[in-house]
Amino acid sequence: MTYWKRLLVLSLAVPGLAFAQQPAAPTPTAALQPVPTNAGPGLSLDDAMSTALVQNPDYQQWLNNENPANMAVKSAYASFLPGASASLGANYTGSGSSNFGGQNVVKTSASRGSNYSIDLDWGLNGRILATPGQSKANLRATQEQIDAAKVQLRAAVLVAYLNVLQTNARIDVVNQQVGRNRVFLDLAKARYQVGQATMLDTRQAEVTLGQSQVDLLIAKQQNADARLELYRLMGVPAPDGFEGVRLTDSFPVVQPAWALDSLLATAAEVNPNLRAAEASADASRYNVRAVKGEYFPSLSARATWSGYTQDYTDTTAVAGSNSGTYPWGFIGQPFQVFAGLSLPIFDGLSRETRVSQAKAQRDDANEQVRGQSLLIRSQVTSRYLGVSTAYQGIGVAEANRIAAADQLRLAQDRYRLGQGTALELSDSEGAVQRAEGTYVDAVYGYHKAVAALEEAVGQPLR
């Protein structure tokens, strides 16, 4: 039997020897699809986001700051109302001798008493007048910080979701490589059996297959790590069988059409980090007003209602009978009211020190606004360029993938015809795996670049 007849028989006998029927590399659309599976429930990006906003512990800590800030605003307005207090007390004094005014006074009976007091206090000064505006500015800053934390959390969840899809696609790439390497090993064994290859070819094919199987294990571990990170950001434990949970969202590659000037204008308007810095600057300006208010007069007023009881425990030992009013038969005291105006004249320059410190804080806050604005402009510009670069990288990776696939077909034909070596075919298969992996990374790198741009701007862009 001639060489060509023997090779034809072996090709028909060994399944999968036809290299030309190898699985095609992922297309730009297919590379973005979730890995099809019939196991496990589905998880959409919206569900992941919604869960994270309710369960993520770091974001919940930011939410906890809003209620105290709200109460501070209410307290600032309540400072214009009078304060009220009430007290109730009782006392007891035993009998015996005591010194009073240099003379001994002898009490033949113990005495007891009770008292009450109701007080209203009211005051008004420059700090009280400025406190509502300062508290509202602090509340706005807190709310913007919460919004900033929300933007950051959404970006982190999106990137984690993309990481799972990316590692899913990488598993697909390595699975294809394992399949190619199995075919390579079968053909190497078949050629060795008919004397057209050496044991070195078989061993080379075995090593190549083993390496791809190791790569598959690593890809699966990376996929599990990405899934665990996604659930951590969602703020919930990973469910049993989390490896089989399907991610139902896909992300088509669309040529970016954003204008840098428009993105910069949007970021200057809506970025929560910048808005938080501006609100903090407003609060610092109100603080300067509050400290300067210490130079102005302070008004104060007070009203008091009070009463008391007192009697002796042994009425027979004391002249006059027991009054019998203890503890609730109070004798009312005269109503008291006070109103006053105070003007501090000199306090050792402490007010001047506080004003200087408040102005420095205000100036620092203004510089923080300017610095935040510059940072946002820099981030938006850099990430805008990064999106453009990442999109171009997809085209380069696609061209490299096509070239590597052509190289592999040529190497397969040469090896099938006995003109190529096992090492040459192994290198070509490795080049295809690397090219396909690079393409997957380029696609998801583009989507992560868009996510980073959205975070810099402060709102979704698609």
Image (tube, rainbow, N blue to C red):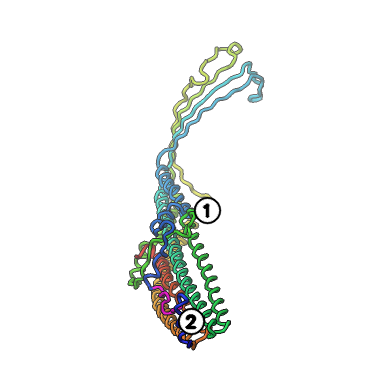
List the residue tagged with mark 1: 349
Camera-nearest residue between 79 and 163: 163
Q: Which residue is mark 2?
A: 428
Measuring from the top left, give residue 198's x and y in whole percent: 57, 84
Residue 317, above or below 75: above
Question: Which numbered disc flags the more N-terminal residue, 2 or 1?
Answer: 1
Tell me residue 359's x, y (percent). Answer: 46, 58
Q: Are circles 2 and 1 on residues that touch, CB within 8 Å?
A: no
Please check the rendered image and state whether residue 23 is part of the magenta-colored stretch, yes or no.
yes
Q: Quadrant of the C terminus?
A: bottom left
Q: Which residues are magenta?
A: 17-26
Q: Residues within 10 Å of mark 1 (few under 14, many from 20)?
A: few
* Prevailing secondary structure of the magenta residues: loop
Give the image quarter of residue 207. Answer: bottom right
Please tell me which residue lies in front, 424 or 433.
Answer: 424
Question: Which label lies toward us, 2 or 1?
Answer: 2
Q: Residue at x 44, y 40 (%)?
A: 300
- As helix, strand or loop, the secondary structure at mark 2 comes to helix
Q: Quadrant of residue 8?
A: bottom left
Disc 1 residue type (three-letter): Leu
**At 51% from the left edge and 69% from the top edge, which residue is drawn?**
216
Number of marks present in the image shown: 2
Task: Report the front residue among 229 and 34.
Answer: 34
Name the amino acid, label 2.
Ser
Q: CA distance from mark 2 to mark 1?
A: 82 Å
Question: Can residue 10 be seen in this snapshot?
Answer: yes
